Amino acid sequence: MKTLNAVRLAGRDVLPLIEGGKGISITSGVSSGLWAAAGGVGTVSAVNADSYDRGGNLIPQIYHGRTRRDRHEELVKYSVDGAVAQIRKAHELRGDGGSLNINILWEMGAAERILNAVLDKTKGLVHGVTCGAGMPYKLSQIAAEYGVHYYPIISSARAFRALWKRAYHKFYEWMGAVVYEDPWRAGGHNGLSNSEDPAVPEDPYPRVKLLRDQMREMGVGEIPIVMAGGVWFLREWQDWIDNDELGPIVFQFGTRPLLTKESPISDEWKQTLLSLKKGDVFLHRFSPTGFYSSAIKNDYLRELAERSERQIPFSVDPVGEHQAQLDVGARKRPIYVTEKDRKHALEWLRTGFTETLRTPDQTLIFVTLEKRDEIRKDQADCMGCLSQCLFSNWADNEKNSTGRKADPRSFCIQKTLQDIAHGGSVENNLAFAGHNAYRFSEDPFYSNGFIPSVKELVNRIMTGD
């Protein structure tokens, strides 16, 4: 294993190891502060982080507003208060070690407002901002205004070129690093484009080399590239270290820090990670963001898949192949489907999926009465956690609407991530994980259910394992 030398990031010499930011209270001030204390870059999630009252008690994120706009303002306050609280805790634990970044999603609701407010309230505590899930054109300007470095997350050289041409060339001196997040291997939301096959992973080396060549053409060839997604043993990446072709490389770990003593996730979640097998993480497209995302296969994802499978196209009048009449809803209003789909629909109705919900694609899905009521309640309770949401039709614009019908094939991402982050069932919630998570069950380091401290994990990674 080659020696890992310190790298210069945000004006500080740190280990080339970054803790990947994971939203909704998962990358806490404790875990990120201790990662930084170990000499690397800790990343505090600024996406709906937990905040506390004066007695140190968790403040539940409960919404009282009668309108979505009112609840959205509550969400913004929760987000700012939580991020500030976690950053202060991380700074306290960091001591003189490493550095601290914060992570935000550009596609979260009020991303600019929240980022500005958080940086304003934590001056001198944050060294960098990591940002992905969209095209964060204004990230560079905001970072420059507060004197912090920015770390855009991209999944292709083409995406970086677009960001550079539009904005980043104006503030290149504040670019801390460029995070290449592998769209086939990383956990959470993935940046696959329409031209890329989700079933055919590509080798990251030529993609990162292309990014480096492009950065050199732009005059920022010595800025580090962060390899994120699919990194487990550093000995498997030795060819990337001190590689003149790739230039300075830093490695990001998102999934492995989930399994530490200080990680805030539940014991159930930790034990689930220890038992995963290859293929147990699923790349799906049910997210209300419209992005692909990677999560543990469980009952929650199975229900979403089955919900979409119980789906047929229809028309309100007999047209083309849609000649078979089907009466749906409490009023038994007629719609027209193919004869084959009518047979499917009658079988679903017979087996308890008696309720129909229309999608924006002129299709119907068939669900139980209980699931229909749950979907409608979740849509009604929307608090605008995304800049635009397929599930509720919320949008962060003047009308607060996408102008499209809400899609019942998706789900309320805020609800499920808040639940699993605070002890909710792993089987019945969205549980993000990288595709290498199965390696917990194969890695001798975790034998007999061993769960390391953050410090022990960083030391282990430094050995190459």
Image: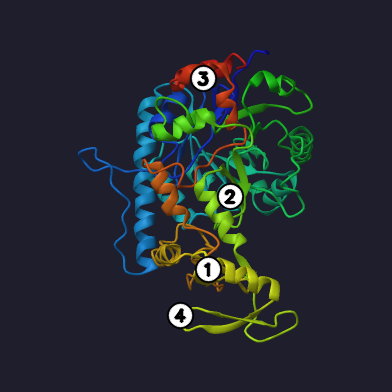
Residue at horizontal 57 percent and vertical 84 percent from the top: 334
Q: Quadrant of residue 183?
A: top right
Q: Nearer the viewer, mark 3 or mark 2?
A: 3
Report whether 359 appears left or right of 259: right
Residue annotated with mark 2 = 133
- Sequence-earlier tag: 3 or 4: 4
Question: Which residue lies at the image location 65% right of the left edge and 38% below the top edge?
Answer: 185
Percent from the top left, x then y, of residue 36?
46, 25
- Distance, label 3 to label 4, CA atoms, is 54 Å
**Residue appearing at x 33%, y 51% in the figure:** 61
Give the mark nearest the N terminus, 4 or 1. 4
Q: CA distance from mark 3 to mark 2?
A: 31 Å
Callout 4: 10 Å neighbours few (<14), some, many (20+)?
few
Amino acid type for the residue under numbered disc 4: Ala
Q: Earlier in the sequence, mark 2 or mark 1?
A: 2
Q: Which mark is residue 330?
A: 4
Mark nearer the N terminus (2 vs 4): 2
